[in-house]
Image (cartoon, rainbow, N blue to C red):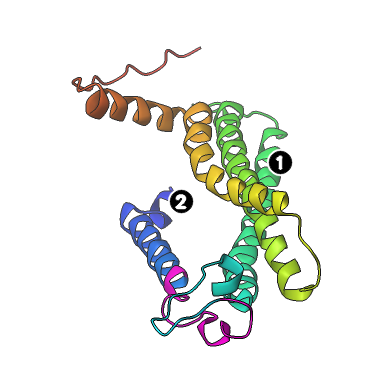
Amino acid sequence: MCLLRVVTPRRAGTAVLLCWLVSIVVGLLPMLGWNNLHLLSYNGSLVTDDLLVTCGFETVISMYYMVYFNFFGWVLPPLLLMLAIYVEIFYMIHKQLNKKVTASHTDPRRYFGKELKLAKSLALVLFLFAVSWLPLHILNCITLFCPDFDKPMFLIYIAIILTHGNSAVNPIVYAFRIKKFRTAFRKIWKQYVLCQDPVEELPDAPP
């Protein structure tokens, strides 16, 4: 009940809105002036009188923005924080599962077993996020701190593909690992793609 009092729909919606607002502001900063426009005449790009620029990511985007502000400020700290939170969650669930089952209306092992399965699914999402995004950020760090290092182009392409693939993998993970998401996806597919009337699924029969 304590969790239900803390995580209300209103607070959850506010948190999601704040995340989107922060993401928009952080993403727009290069367009608002934090870029290499003032350096383009010195780093090999072509700038005409009409300000036509030979566009390249590392040419236009400041690596100080990508590394210090984006990676060290908005990617790495939340990633480490979520990692610490999941370690604590798994520890608490493991601790509860190892306790002796006392007489009660609900089976603690069954309840915490479901919580453990959900935690594993969300931890998998976190792991895939790290695998997908850390390579590109590491390459950005190499670009900033070791500018003379010649990065293989195929590594850059792989890192970029991984970042795009992360968004495609998440729905699959949710659908296969979490029943509520799977049910919601199936309902949306039937209603908006197949144009069928959604039918409420019957709950699973108790074992």
Asked if residue 2 lies left or right of residue 154, the reply is left
Identity, as a three-letter code, of the amino acid under mark 2: Leu
Q: Secondary structure at mark 1?
A: helix
Using the image, determine if residue 63 lies above or below residue 42: above
Asked if residue 180 lies left or right of residue 55, the reply is left
Question: What residue is drawn where x is 65% and y is 28%?
Answer: 101
Residue 32: where, in percent of width, then height? 41, 80
Asked if residue 134 lies left or right of residue 41, the reply is right
Q: Nearer the viewer, residue 34 or 93?
A: 34
Residue 74: where, in percent of width, then height? 57, 68
Label 2: which residue? 3
Question: What residue is drawn where x is 76% and y is 74%?
Answer: 147
Residue 17: where, in percent of width, then height? 35, 62
Using the image, determine if residue 80 lies above or below residue 122: below
Identity, as a three-letter code, of the amino acid under mark 1: Lys
Q: Residues within 10 Å of mark 2 (few under 14, many from 20)?
A: few
Give yes or no for residue 40 being in the magenta stretch. Answer: yes
Residue 61 visible to an observer of this rendering: no
Callouts 1 and 2 close, C-beta under 8 Å: no
Q: Which mark is residue 204?
A: none
Residue 192 visible to an observer of this rendering: yes
Label 1: which residue? 95
Q: Nearer the viewer, residue 14 or 108?
A: 14
Q: Secondary structure at mark 2?
A: helix
Question: What residue is drawn where x is 57% and y is 85%?
Answer: 41
Which image quadrant is residue 95 in? top right
Give yes or no for residue 53 being in the magenta stretch. Answer: no
Using the image, determine if residue 43 lies above or below residue 164: below
Numbered range of the magenta stretch: 27-45
Q: Residues within 10 Å of mark 1 (few under 14, many from 20)?
A: few
Residue 137: where, in percent of width, then height? 66, 62
Mark positioned earlier in the residue sequence (1 or 2): 2
